[in-house]
Amino acid sequence: MVARRPCASAVVAAAGSGTRMGAAVPKQYLDLGGVPIVVRSIAALASSGAVGEMVAAVPSGDEERFEREIVRRYSLSSLFERGCTVVAGGSSRQASVTRALGAVSGEYEIVVVHDAARPLVTAGEVWAAVEAAMEWGAATCATAPTDTVKSVMAATTHRAAHFVAETLDRSRLRMIQTPQAFKLSVLREAHEHSNASPATDDCALVERLGLPVAVVPGSRRNIKITNPLDLAVAEALLASESRVGAGAEANAMEMSGTGAAGGLEPPTIRLGQGFDLHRLAPGRRLVLGGVEIPASLGLVGHSDADVLTHAVIDALLGAAGLGDIGQHYPDTDPAYAGASSISLLSHAVDMLRAAGYRVCSLDTVVIAEQPKIGPFAAHMRESLANAMKVSPGCVNIKGKTTEGLGPTGTGEAIAALAVAMVMDMRGGAAV
């Protein structure tokens, strides 16, 4: 399908304490598949292509930590046209969204509100909400209940807590999820007229204005992680999807089947290529693929100048559409002076995983007259594989010469080429 341009801002409600999880930190900071839940939620919004900026409302006093450990560590700002903004949340979800709306730029007509604890939302669900909001002014994702639903009344005796009052027609009922999408003017008006009267979601505030709220299909996969069981289910979903991507049964995780986001789509494969060249000079370490090699000359660069690892990083970022190494690790930033390129690779892989990608395989070529690559190839494969969280069998390293031609042939430089293959595990992300 034809790619669509970003048309929405996003507010991510990440200020909750998550007491029902019973963890030492708020639930949005807990790991899901090795990546914080909130990072997955934000990256899912970014990967939809619908969102051009993100504002996160976080626990008051946690802004600096969130900026450092979440936004900067996973380079989340680079995923959006207008970057990420972090604001202090309020005493309630409603107050937090109100504060976040104050930081929205106004560049986009639509604003999407999403729970930080819904990391498995698909692009199809985001776009469905956005497009419905464009037409109706407000929209929410929702699923139909599968259980019988009854209203109850409090018991008048101590023998029972409640009695059934009525069995409800579940064909008229929906379980509300996020994302919820609104015309920015509509949601701002709704919050301005709320008078701090509590509501459990933003759609309720719009309803009070007498305005329509469209309902679009969500999915049972788009769970909200509230307690340890939810987290276990989300881990199982990710693990099952990884098995599907590795060639297991493509239908194993069939979901509710409602709308474009109803089922798990098989992962797609994406390729990226990388190239780098660094000159050689005395007095420098020679590091290739994270392995220091004894030599009289070393590679010159702002970091440790590991030309092979730099090519690998560029290949991975290219495969995931996440820019290039210079964008994320500029040689003008003193923070990367002398930096370990293998550490940068590990960070880049964290970014890919947060955006919904998994490394499949890597093929590389080191172009140099000296040293001979063969004796060090196995150690280099292991080093690169560890950083990419794959087995060494997924990594290939070849050594080539240019037979005396060019700067690599005369021993002035070493060059490297890399081709990476990654799996797009997001499901329904193509738009």
Image (tube, rainbow, N blue to C red):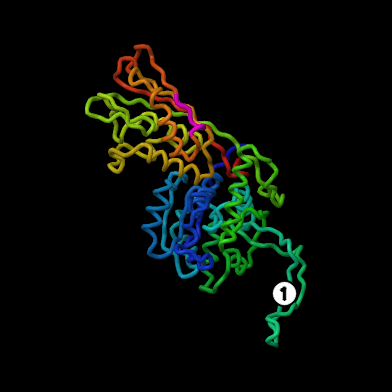
> Viewed as shown, does residue 392 lie left or right of 161?
left
- Residue 278's place in the image compared with 114, above or below, is above
Magenta residue span: 392-397
| Nearer the observer, 383 or 255 | 383
- Residue 349's place in the image compared with 366, above or below, is below
Q: Amino acid at mark 1?
A: Ser
Q: Residue furthest bottom?
A: 157
- Report which residue position mark 1 lands on: 151
Image coords of residue 88 (percent x, y): 41, 63
Image coords of residue 140 (percent x, y): 63, 58
Q: Residue furthest left?
A: 283
> Viewed as shown, does residue 31 lie left or right of 370?
right
| Residue 241 picture quarter | top right
- Residue 77's place in the image compared with 291, above or below, is below
Q: Residues within 10 Å of mark 1 (few under 14, many from 20)?
A: few
Image coords of residue 337 (percent x, y): 28, 39
> Viewed as shown, does residue 373 lie left or right of 203?
left
Q: Residue at x 48, y 66 (%)?
A: 17
Would residue 396 be counted in the magenta stretch? yes
Q: Secondary structure at mark 1?
A: strand
Q: Residue at x 39, y 20 (%)?
A: 367
- Quadrant of the snapshot with the C terminus: top right
Image coords of residue 184 (percent x, y): 53, 57
Would residue 118 be counted in the magenta stretch? no
| Nearer the observer, 176 or 180 | 176
Q: How many marks?
A: 1
| Residue 170 picture quarter | bottom right
- Quadrant of the snapshot with the N terminus: top right
